[in-house]
Image (cartoon, helix red, strand yellow):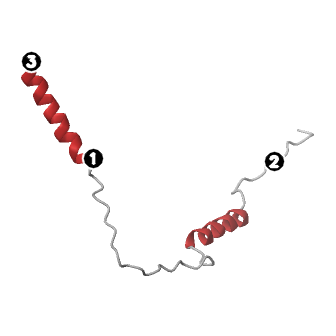
Amino acid sequence: MFKVLKAGLVAVTALTASTAYAGGPVLIEEGNNELITEAPSSRVGILPVIGALVLVCLLACGGGDDDPAPEPDPDPK
């Protein structure tokens, strides 16, 4: 009974110990005092431009080819 319990405990420890260090250690380099320049905030990405084009196309194209229903003849003969 204790052999099975001990084997299970060892297996669980071996499986969970490797996931504890999955990200690896964090290394901080000393002496690197260079500043990272930020990108200018006026830079526009491509996604807003594509979104605006899709919106303009939706407004310009309309709803589709829905023909209005013909009105019934008020005096059928």
Q: Disc 3 marks which amino acid?
A: Met
Q: Secondary structure at mark 1?
A: helix
Residue 4 in percent (x, y) is at 10, 24
Q: Residues within 10 Å of mark 3 (few under 14, many from 20)?
A: few
**Residue bearing the label numbered 2:** 70
26 vs 35, left or right, is left
Q: CA distance from mark 1 to mark 3?
A: 29 Å
Residue that protrudes farthest toward the right in the picture: 75
Q: Secondary structure at mark 2?
A: loop
Q: Tell me the number on the disc at residue 59.
A: none
Q: Disc 2 marks which amino acid?
A: Pro
Classify 21 as above or below 60.
Answer: above
Q: Earlier in the sequence, mark 1 or mark 2?
A: 1
**Residue bearing the label numbered 3:** 1
Taking depth in this image into account, of 43 and 66 the one nearest to the observer is 43
Q: Residue at x 85, y 45 (%)?
A: 71
Q: Disc 1 marks which amino acid?
A: Ala
